[in-house]
Amino acid sequence: MRKPFVAGNWKMNTDSHTGVSLAEGVACGSMDIAGRSVDVAVIPPFVYLQAVVRALNRSHIAVGAQDIYYEQKGAFTGEVSASMLKDVGCIYVLCGHSERRHVIGESDELVNKKINAAICSGVLPIFCVGEKLEEREASLTKEVVGRQVRSGLAGLDVEKASALTVAYEPVWAIGTGRTATTEQAQEVHAMIRKLLGEMYDAQLAQEIRILYGGSVKPDNAADLMRQEDIDGLLVGGASLNADDFVAIIKAAS
Ligand code: PGA
C-alpha cells in the first residue's frame, strides 16, 4: 500500500566525476525496479545537483537536495531557495537532518519554515527527526521525537502534510555503525504514525511514508523493511558505494 522509498544522502562527499559515476552505477544496477516496485532518490551536494540530474535523465531515480533556505530570493548570501532547487530538477529536499540540527545548530522553528517553503514551491520534503543518545538513555525518545514532529509541522494543513516523507534517524545510529534494533525502530515509527493520525487524520497517517535512517547497510536493510511501519530507508555511508546502495534498494523493493 505504501510504496517503499530508498534515498541516499551523500552528505559532503563525492566530486564532479565520482558523483556522476556513482549516480550512473545506481541507475544501472536498479534499472528493473527503480520507480516500479521502489522509489529511489539520490541526494548529492548542491554543486553537483545539475550534473547528477543530467546523468539520471533517462532513469527513474529522483534527485534531492540536502538543505534549503526558506526565503524565495534576495540578500541571503550562501543560501539556496526551493524554487532554485526545483529549477535544476530536484524533486526532494532533506529538512532537519540531524547534522543540520546538531552540527550547524538548526532549530525546530527553522526546520518548520524550510518544510513549509519546500512544499509551497512543489519540492517534496524528507523531514528528519531523531533523538540523541543521552535522550534515549533518559527515556526521552518519544518526548523528543514527538516535539520535533509537532514543531516541524506547525501550521501545516493536511493537504500540505500529505507532501511529506518523514525519516526517523536516531542520532546515535548515524554514521556510528550502531543501528537501532528493528524493535526500537518499529516502536518509534509506530509512535510517529499515531501522532500524525492525531494531528491530521487516519488516512494521512496510513499513507505517509516513514523511512528509517542510521547505519543502514545491505545486511540489515531487509530486516528493517520487514517492520510494519518502516516504509523505506534513508542511507548515508552505504549510499556512496553503488553496489551497496543497489543491494539496499533491492532489499527494500
Ligand atoms: P548513515 O547516515 O547511513 O551513514 O548512518 C544516515 C543519514 O545521516 O542519513
Image (tube, rainbow, N blue to C red):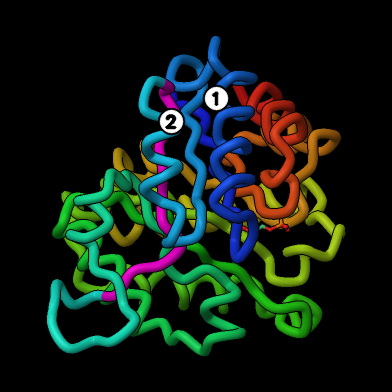
Magenta extent? 59-69
Cβ–Cβ below 8 Å for labels 2 and 1?
yes
* Residue 15: mark: none
Q: Please provide percent x and percent y for residue 247.
A: 74, 27
Residue at x-position 74% and y-position 40%: 241
Residue at x-position 85% and y-position 34%: 219
| Side of 45 relative to 171 (left or right) | left
State the CA–CA distance, disc 2 to disc 1. 7 Å
Label 1's element?
Answer: helix
Towards the viewer: 71 or 211: 71
Tell me which corner region of the image, top left, top right, bottom left or bottom right, holds residue 75: bottom left
Q: Is residue 133 above or below residue 240?
A: below
Towards the viewer: 113 or 140: 113
* Residue 56: mark: 2
* Disc 2 residue: CB within 8 Å of ligand 1: no
- The quadrant the C terminus occupies is top right
Q: Please provide percent x and percent y for residue 116.
A: 22, 67
> Is residue 10 covered in magenta?
no
Residue at label 1? 27
> Is residue 62 covered in magenta?
yes
Q: Please provide percent x and percent y for residue 206.
A: 39, 38
| Side of 190 relative to 109 (left or right) | right
Kind of residue at disc 1: Ala
Kind of residue at disc 2: Leu
| Side of 120 relative to 16 (left or right) | left
| Side of 251 relative to 74 (left or right) | right
Q: Quadrant of ligand 1?
A: bottom right
Tell me which corner region of the image, top left, top right, bottom left or bottom right, holds residue 89: top left
